[in-house]
Structures are given as C-alpha cells and as structure tokens.
Amino acid sequence: MDNEIKMMLNAILEEIAHVDERVNKRFDKVEAQLDSLQHEVNACKLERESIGLLIKKIDQLESRIEELEKRTA
C-alpha cells in the first residue's frame, strides 16, 4: 500500500512539474508580447508628441507669413 501511495504521489508531483513548466513557458511568451506592445505604445506616444510639435511650428510659421504679408501689402 505504501509503495502504491508513493507511486501516485510521484505521478502527481511529476504532473504538477509538467503543468508548472507549461505555465512558465506561456508566461514568458505573454511577457515578451507585453514588452513588444509597450515599445509600440511608447513609439506611438513619441510620434504623437512629434506631430503636435510640428503642428505648433506650422501654426507659428503661418502666423509669421500672415504678418509679413500684411507688412508688404
């Protein structure tokens, strides 16, 4: 009886180890995807800020052009 219990316990422990290994592999994949998504988000934020600065600069240049046109008219 003791031998049978040990065998069952070992089988359960092996299965737990197998499940743990599968979960860890899956977690590593998800973590890598999350890191990749974070880089994408950061790139989008930087792009948005750059576009905002460009629009602001365009507005400033348009104002300067209008001012120059008024002076020369």
Image: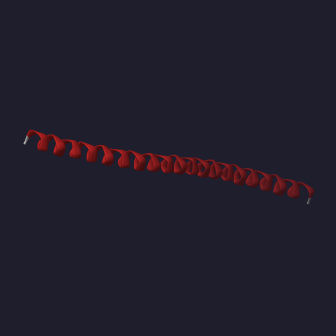
Which quadrant: the C terminus? bottom right
Along the horizontal axis of the image, is 17 left or right of 7? right
Along the horizontal axis of the image, is 51 left or right of 12? right
Residue positioned 69% across, 49% down in the render? 53
Numbered-mark total: 0
The residue nearer to you, when weighing 62 against 31, is: 31
**x and y, in percent, of residue 21 in the image:** 36, 45
**x and y, in percent, of residue 3 in the image:** 12, 40
**x and y, in percent, of residue 26 in the image:** 41, 50
Residue positioned 76% across, 54% down in the render? 58
- Check the image and name the residue furthest to the left: 1
Indicate how the structure is coloured in the image: secondary structure
The residue nearer to you, when weighing 61 against 45, is: 45
Residue positioned 27% across, 48% down in the render? 15
Residue positioned 21% across, 46% down in the render? 12
The residue nearer to you, when weighing 32 against 51, is: 32
**x and y, in percent, of residue 68 in the image:** 87, 54
Along the horizontal axis of the image, is 36 left or right of 8? right
| Residue 4, quarter of picture | top left
The residue nearer to you, when weighing 32 against 19, is: 19
Which quadrant: the N terminus? top left
- Check the image and name the residue furthest to the bottom: 73
- Check the image and name the residue furthest to the right: 72
